[in-house]
Image (cartoon, rainbow, N blue to C red):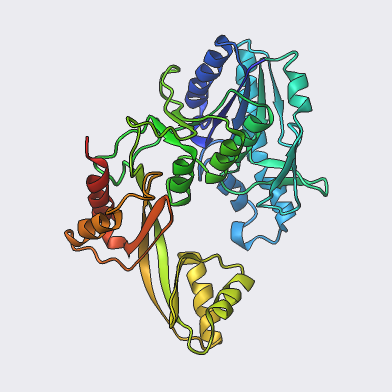
Amino acid sequence: MEIMVQKFGGTSVQDDQARHKALQHVKYAIEQGYKVVVVVSAIGRKGAPYATDSLLNLVDAERTKLSPRELDMIVSVGEIISTAVFTQLLKEEGILATAMTGPDAGFRTNNDYQNAKVLDVKTDNINKAFSNNDVVVVAGFQGLSREGHMATLGRGGSDTSAALLGAALSAKRVDIFTDVSGMMTGDPRLVKKAKFLKNVSYEEVANMAHEGAKVIHPRAVEIAQQAHVPLRIRSTWDNVDELGTLISDKNLSLQDYRSVTGIAHQVGLTQFSVLTKEFSADQVFNLLADNRLSVDFINILPEKVVFNLNHEETKIAKELLQNKKIPFTLVENCAKVSIVGAGIMGTPGITAKIVSALASNNVKILQTTDSYTTIWVLVQEDDLEVSVNALHDTFLLKD
C-alpha cells in the first residue's frame, strides 16, 4: 500500500469551487493507485466565518479572558468543520472516505496550548481506516495534549501535520497545495523577474521560509528532511499533472549547481543598538529572554549589541530598556533581505556583489550577517523593492 499525503490550505477549501478543484487532485492520486491522507486547514482566511482569526474574534481575540487551553477549544473547530465538509464532498462523489480530528489521527502533544509540540503520531487508526477507505481526511493544526485536551500547533500547523503524517506513514510524497504553482526565486508581487524553481533542496526552502517566504512552514520542511520524504509545492488551481516544485535532498550535479537559490524578505522590523558599558551583553539578552522576546539578526560588538524585533515586540523592549536605564538607539521601519543558497559557502565574491548591487542603487546597508547558506542585510523598508530586485538581478538572471 503506497500512501500520498495531500494538504489543502484555507484558500484551497474556501468555497465549493475551490473544494471541487481540490477534489480533482485527490481523485487523480486514487487513480494512480495511492491511498490518500488529506490534511485540511480551516475554511478561508481572515473574515471567513470559520477561519482561525474569525473564531478568535468571537472571544475578543487578544483581549480574551480565556486561557490558552480554552482558546484551543474554539480555534480547533475551524479545521474540524473543514474536515467534515470536505469528507461530505468526497462521499457525494462516491469516494470511500472517512474523517478524523487530529487526536483521532493519533497526534499526541505536550501541554503548550496555542503552540503545542507534537510528541508522537500513532497511525493505527489511519492504517485501520485504509482497509475500508481510499481517503482519510484529517483536521490539521491539532492534537491531544498530555492532559487529554485539544491542543493546537501554532501558525502553519497544518503544514506540520501533513509532514508528520508523511513521515509516520512512510508516504511516497507530501503535496502542499496552495494558491501558487510552486517556489519562486523571489516574491512575484515584489520581484519583477522572479523565476519558477522546479527543484530545490530541503535546506534552501527551510531557510527561505524562515526568512519570510510564506509558501510553506519551515518546521514542515525540517520534518520531511529528517524523514527523507519528498515534498511538492503545488497549486490547487493547476492541472492534476502539473507537479509544481519538488523539495528533496540536494543534488549538486553540475547542471543543477547554483550559488544562490532565491531572495526572501521580512518587513516590520526595528533595529536596536544597545550600549553595553554598564550592562553586559548577557544581561541585556537575559532581560529580553525573561520577558519572552525573541531577538533576531544579532551582532555583538565590544561596546554594544545590535539586534532586531518586530513591531509588536518593539514597544515592550523599549519600556524594559528605559526602566533599567540602559542606553539605546533604534531605527524603525526596517526590512531584512536574505540571499539564500546552498552554494554560498565557499563561493568568493558573494558579499562584494551584494554591497555593489545595493550601493549602485543608493541603498544604505544598516546591518549584515551570514551563515553558510544565507546572507542577511538590513535596509529601510522604503528601499525594500529596489533592494530585492537589485539582488535578484545580480544573482539570479544569469540565464
Question: How many numbered discs, if any?
Answer: 0
Residue 246 in sight here: yes
In this picture, residue 70 sits left or right of residue 276: right
Residue 50 in sight here: no
Quarter the C terminus occupies: top left
Where is residue 168, by image quadrant?
top right
Q: Residue at x 43, y 77 (%)?
A: 301
Q: Residue at x 43, y 28 (%)?
A: 235
Q: What x and y, as percent, mark residue 331?
A: 36, 73
Q: What x and y, as percent, mark residue 232?
A: 48, 29
In this picture, residue 4 sits left or right of residue 345: right
Q: Residue at x 43, y 23 (%)?
A: 243
Q: Judge whether 12 appears above or below 380 on screen.
A: above
In this picture, residue 209 sits left or right of residue 347: right
Q: What x and y, as percent, mark residue 350?
A: 29, 53
Q: Judge whether 184 appears above or below 358 on screen.
A: above
Q: What x and y, as percent, mark residue 386?
A: 23, 54
Q: Residue furthest left?
A: 360
In this picture, residue 108 sits left or right of residue 198: right
Q: Judge whether 162 appears above or below 259 on screen.
A: above
Along the line of sight, the residue nearer the viewer: 23 or 346? 346
Along the line of sight, the residue nearer the viewer: 252 or 192? 252
Quarter the N terminus occupies: top right
